Image (cartoon, rainbow, N blue to C red):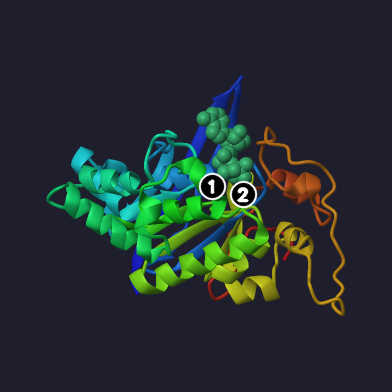
Amino acid sequence: MGKLLCTKDLCKYYEKSKNVVKAVDCVSIELDEGETLGLVGESGCGKSTTGRTILRLIEPTSGSVTFDGKDVTTFNKNELLEYRRNAQIIFQDCYASLSPRFKAGNLITEALEIHGIGDNKNDRWAIAKKVFEDVSLTEDHMNKYPHEFSGGQRQRIGIARAICLNPKMIICDEPVSALDVSVQAQIINLMQKIQRDLGIAYIFISHDLSVVKHISDRIAVMYLGRIVEMAPKKEFYDNPVHPYSKALLSAIPIPDPTIKREKIIIPTELNATQYGDGCRFCQRCWKAKEICKEATPELQEVSPGHTVACHFM
Ligand SMILES: Nc1ncnc2c1ncn2[C@@H]1O[C@H](COP(=O)(O)OP(=O)(O)OP(=O)(O)O)[C@@H](O)[C@H]1O
Ligand SMILES: [Mg+2]
């Protein structure tokens, strides 16, 4: 399978009272067609900014985004419209943020109309009905309003909205974080089924490594704007190398009572304004030495497809 998405040294910096917040700092990721990359890290590490910059909902400060071999950062209006059709986003609760008077079905027909799909209203309603079926909702649901749905149903509508244009990629920004655990599993299963049927690639954003474990092919861990570790899923969960990844993984509750895992405590709080030289994690890292304060570690391959940015590995 070919590369669908490629970012190279993607950066998004914000000015904040004399400081520069490097929300996204030199992020280089690749995504194959039909693949799922789990993008994980604590609140404020830059996951959403990465996703939105890829989609050009936010303009990058520097770096490049290539989609299907084309440079997204140079797209004109028409090219951007086509890109928006191919590259969709799902939020925590996109439907709830809309007008309470917006019928669920019209969320789909409106998107179809913007992109010139379907000859008339009836046509588009029929297409929408099919998409609703794909997410296990009925025509009855199409005539309902946001407040009439549960959180899980609203997320199904969000998924329907994202897939109705036949995209090649969906950026899923914490799509299940607001849902109960049992509903989370249903939605993730649905997303996997849709991926199998339609061959869509996902960037699946979460702060929770146990959420992305099931659905991801590869995992990327982000810390204060930078990717610190990236690996195929099995390799990552079996053999995490970066101290931050280890710490995150040690916080996963393990259901089997015969397995005990020592929880690693990360010493200090996330400090989003610490942006000097050196490893961003060094203040919290139990392995840190002098060099960690002086030089930013670059990603290096430790085994095929497994890269880590740490001076001590
Ligand atoms: N428009 C903005 N102006 C200034 N700073 C911003 C802006 N948007 C984001 N940031 C900062 O960039 C950093 C990354 O934010 P981002 O929302 O991408 O993180 P996140 O990983 O998605 O967090 P969460 O898990 O809470 O959703 C944060 O420090 C945030 O305060
Ligand atoms: Mg976010």
Q: Position of residue 11 (x, y in %)?
A: 48, 42
Residue 77 is left or right of residue 238, and the answer is left
Disc 1 and disc 2 in contact, CB within 8 angstroms: yes
Image quarter hosting the N terminus: bottom left
Residue 146 is labelled as none
Image quarter hosting the C terminus: bottom right
Q: Can the viewer see residue 174?
A: no
- Which of the two residues, 276 or 148, is positioned nearer the viewer here? 148
**As displayed, is residue 56 above or below residue 200?**
above
- Which of the two residues, 211 or 12, is positioned nearer the viewer here? 211
Q: Residue at x 24, y 52 (%)?
A: 125
Q: Position of residue 124 (x, y in %)?
A: 21, 52
* Circle 1: element type: loop
Quarter-wise, where is residue 215 in the image? bottom right
Identify the residue under disc 1: 92
* Circle 2: element type: loop
Cβ of mark 2 under 8 Å from ligand 1: the answer is no
**As displayed, is residue 142 above or below residue 189?**
above
**Which residue type does callout 2 highlight?**
Ala
Q: Position of residue 291 (x, y in %)?
A: 75, 50
Density class for disc 1 (Cα within 10 Å; few <14, some 14-19, many ≥20) is some
Identify the residue under disc 2: 178
Q: Residue at x 37, y 65 (%)?
A: 134
Total numbered circles = 2
Q: Earlier in the sequence, mark 1 or mark 2?
A: 1
Q: Can the viewer see residue 77?
A: yes
Q: Position of residue 101 (x, y in %)?
A: 40, 34
